[in-house]
Image (tube, grey):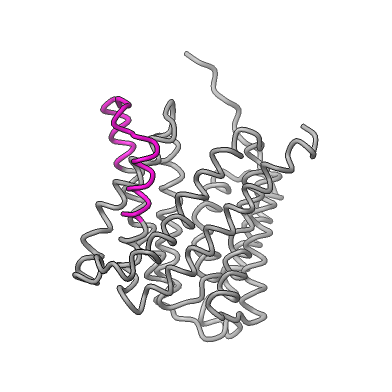
Amino acid sequence: MRFSSLALPILLVVIGMIFTQTGASFAKLLFPLVGANGATALRLTLAALVLVLVFRPWRHRLERKQWRAVLMYGGVMGAMNLFFYAALEHIPLGIAVALEFTGPLAVALFGARRPLDFAWIALALAGFALLLPWTGVSGDISPLGVFLALCAGACWAGYIIFGQRAGTGGGPHIAALGVATAAVIALPFGLVSAGPLLFDPAILPLGLAVALLSSAIPYALDMVALPHVPARLFGILMSGQPAFAALSGLVVLGEVLSAGQIAGMSAIVLASIGATMTIARPKNPSSG
């Protein structure tokens, strides 16, 4: 496939990542009003409403096995968002995304066999170590925030695994059902955190902006781009999420990272890119 035919899909994926991290920055602006759990509930609930109205999942019939996968997919999505937004209360956005990225990176590195594979693991661990608060180079970073971001990363790994199972033979209506399930899980936490403020009309525009930027628009862009982008290239592009998060945190929130934090994030990004490029993927099993 020529670069000219890939240029537009790549641009759409990059724009989607920018929207995602900008939405996360805007979500952090909601924290003083409704708390992290309230922001999570607003994002997922409004995003679910948009996706359900657009993709109308009630028109599709799912088997019991696929329903179980969808519920697990939505469950880990809800937990991932709750942990991630809770982490943002304690650590900068760029660091939270870098630490959360250890989840999909662990999935990519699972079953590593060759020496080069272990080199990427070592690089990722080195980056992770630079972000830990007790190394002396990470700056003022909360251990609780690190723990919450790593919990989000573990949920992200589950999101990938269950998302693949739920999406087999499915379509965009599966994502709508998953986000709706995640919203059902997050909403009680948001109500406990924010109470009636969660339904304050004054904050709904910002909540809708977060939902559109973080979920609806990036998902729509990915839906257009993914059929034209090789899976490995898409993985490489997604490895840039921590960098976009750091940039968004700087521009929107004024979060300035130390040299050690930037080095740790860079190591995790490079490990992800390297793993995506070089680790052998299993061949598709033959049918029957």
Name the foreground residue: 2 vs 280: 2
The span picked out in magenta is 44-71
Specify whether 114 is left or right of 212: right
Q: Does 108 sit left or right of 207 as displayed? A: right
Quadrant where the N terminus sits is top right
Q: Please tell me which residue is depicted at 30% across the width and 25% down the height of the picture.
A: 61
Would you say residue 5 sits in the magenta stretch?
no
Residue at position x 38%, y 73% in the image: 30
- Quadrant location of residue 270? bottom right
Q: Quadrant of residue 151?
A: bottom left
Q: Residue at x 47, y 77 (%)?
A: 91
Q: Nearer the viewer, residue 22 or 193?
A: 22
Q: Position of residue 163 (x, y in %)?
A: 42, 40
Q: Residue at x 37, y 70 (%)?
A: 86
Image position of 34 with respect to 53: above or below: below
Q: Residue 141 location, x and y as percent?
A: 49, 81
